[in-house]
Amino acid sequence: MKAALTVLLLVAVWAPAVQAQVSDTASYLQRMDSDGDGKVSEAEYLQWMLYAFDRMDRNGDGVLSADELPGGKGRAISREQQRQTIVQRFHKQDANGDGFLDARELAAPPR
């Protein structure tokens, strides 16, 4: 679980920087909102957040091994484990329980 949280934290910081420079919550929402409906679905959130995992997985085996993690050490984590962690985070951030994240929910500190 610690490895999953480490990767999630790295993804949250790294993915937006890699995909685009975003200066405010509205821009962040716009980048994540691939269908342009003004809110972020679980699928859109997963796509955005797993981008960094996929970039870090240099050998493409679906597992971040110690040598692929920052610092070259840590417990290996699979893409599926990371996906589950991201889904849990999404539902915690979805304060109103509507199945989407709006700009306010995206900007809120992790719950």
Image (spheres, rainbow, N blue to C red):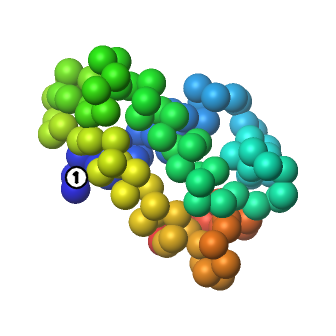
In the rendered view, tell whether residue 42 sits above or below residue 56: below
Relative depth, front residue between 92 and 104: 92
Quadrant occupied by the N terminus = bottom left
Residue under the image location 58 percent in, 42 percent down: 48
Residue 26 locus on image (x, y percent): 80, 51
Residue 67 locus on image (x, y percent): 20, 21
- Give the residue furthest to the bottom: 96
Circle 1 SS class: helix
Residue under the image location 51 percent in, 71 percent down: 91
- Give the residue furthest to the front: 61
Task: Say left or right for 36 vs 69.
Answer: right
Displayed quadrant of residue 22: top right
Residue 82 in sight from this viewpoint: yes
Mark 1, residue position: 2
Residue 71 in sight from this viewpoint: no
Residue 64 locus on image (x, y percent): 27, 32
Relative depth, front residue between 46 and 101: 46
Task: Say left or right for 34 vs 85.
Answer: right
Residue under the image location 41 percent in, 46 percent down: 9
The image shows a total of numbered marks equal to 1
In the rendered view, tell whether residue 25 sits above or below residue 110: above
Other-residue count near label 1 (Cα within 10 Å), few / some / many at <14 / 14–19 / ≥20: few
Task: Say left or right for 13 vs 10.
Answer: right
Residue under the image location 76 percent in, 61 percent down: 39
Residue 72 locus on image (x, y percent): 20, 23
Q: Residue flagged by tag 1: what amino acid is it?
A: Lys
